[in-house]
Amino acid sequence: MSSLMNNYGRFKISFAYGLGAKLYTADNEEYLDFASGISVTNLGHNFKPLTDAVCSQAAKVMHTSNLYEIPLQEELADLISKNSFNGKVFFCNSGAEANEAAIKLARLYGNTIHHGKKYKIISMYNSFHGRTYATMGATAQEKIQKGSYPMPGYNQYIPFNNIEAFKNAVSLNDTAAIILELFQGEGGVIPVDIEFLKEVRRICDEKDILMIVDEVQTGYGRTGELFAYKLFGVVPDIMTLSKSIAGGVPMGAVVSVEKAASLFTGGTHGSTFGGNPLACAAGIAVIKEMTKEGFLQSVKEKGALLKDYLYKNLSDTCLVKGEGLLIGVKTPYSPKDVAEACLENHLLVVTAGNNSVRLYPPLNISSEDLLKGAEIFVSTIKELGK
């Protein structure tokens, strides 16, 4: 009997090593990885600049805590800030922690700047922001919240892309922030409507509401832009990051405009492990690779290649969604059945809501491996239809 708690529905397989877009079992069976650890290993497995950075730093110092200055943390924060919207950065250890910190920052803003009159956090139905208590409260899905009621009373939920619902929700002038994903990944790779997003931004400016964009899954090149907000030309007040930020080393971050970031003063928030030298060394290697000339353009081109193949070879009963290499496919079959059938055919994919599966190959995958994975996926869907 396992000593592990039984909170994961794992596939009955494990992997001993990986290289590029491929994972291998202990028996050397090869699998194409179109999951990337749920958009974490965006540079693939055993990517030399990343593994070199981690090994080199591990041999020096892995952790000192935030009691002391960490030069690598300063360097990584500067790279993130300069490649986004010049915000201030706070480091933590996961996407849930990043979203928790963003919610806390928004509540601080409402309590400090608006003297407690603005306290509500608006989020979307079908969203996913994490499994800590505050982030679970912002995740408007009954299956996530079930068994943990009551949720925090400051949450208010609205339908995604419904601007009238948002206008009604903020009409009492008691809203501190709105948190939303630009593509609802867990919800089925559902994109934000650009007109909705622009109007939300306008209203947030008018009413001094903080716009929090959860880029935990979409960030770091997955959509063909370093951060997905750049696709839409709408800049958030706060952006949360994690997953691929350090290529597999646990890390999260919050990027915030000064008016909110200034409220995180000594003692208001913190993290023992957040931004330690090991994670920052990995994070620097990742962002330097992704900001090289031509990298993001190649992601866009590969995304177009993958979508074109799927459009041409899947039947009309399937719907292909997404941007760059953040691809969702809605099928007539249960996501679990699709994922299990793909696994049998040595392809790893990720399940999602809305009867969809996610195809998240490494961003630096070869065109040959990309099309091979696409062929396996299409043939698997056709097999399920027989």
Image: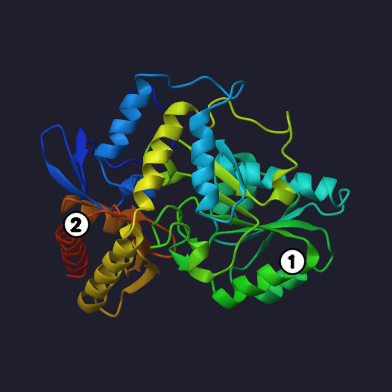
Q: Residue at x 29, y 62 (%)?
A: 298
Image side of residue 141 versus residue 328, left or right: right
**Residue pictured at 34% horizontal, 72% vertical:** 320
The label shown at residue 182 is none
- Is disc 1 placed on a helix, strand or loop? helix
Q: Position of residue 16 (x, y in %)?
A: 20, 32
- Position of 355 compared to 32: left or right? right
Counting from the top left corner in percent of width and height, residue 203 is at 73, 70
Work out whether residue 141 can be spotted. yes
Vertical position of residue 149 compared to residue 205: above or below: above
Q: Position of residue 103 (x, y in %)?
A: 67, 47
Q: Is residue 137 left or right of residue 288?
A: right
Label 2 vs label 1: CA separation? 43 Å
Q: Earlier in the sequence, mark 2 or mark 1?
A: 1
Q: Which residue occupies the foreground of this view, 61 or 236?
A: 61
**Horizontal and vertical percent position of residue 333:** 31, 65
Q: Dot 2 corresponds to which residue?
A: 366
Q: Judge whether 58 appears above or below 359 on screen.
A: above
Determine the secondary structure under disc 2: loop
Is residue 146 in sight in this rendering? no
Residue underneath mark 1 = 205
Q: Residues within 10 Å of mark 1 (few under 14, many from 20)?
A: few
Q: Nearer the viewer, residue 328 or 208?
A: 208
User: Is disc 2 surrounded by few (<14), some (14 to 19) or many (20+) residues within 10 Å?
Assistant: few
Quadrant the N terminus occupies: top left
Furthest-left residue in this view:
28
Residue type at mark 1 is Asp
Q: Exactly how many numbered labels are in the figure?
A: 2
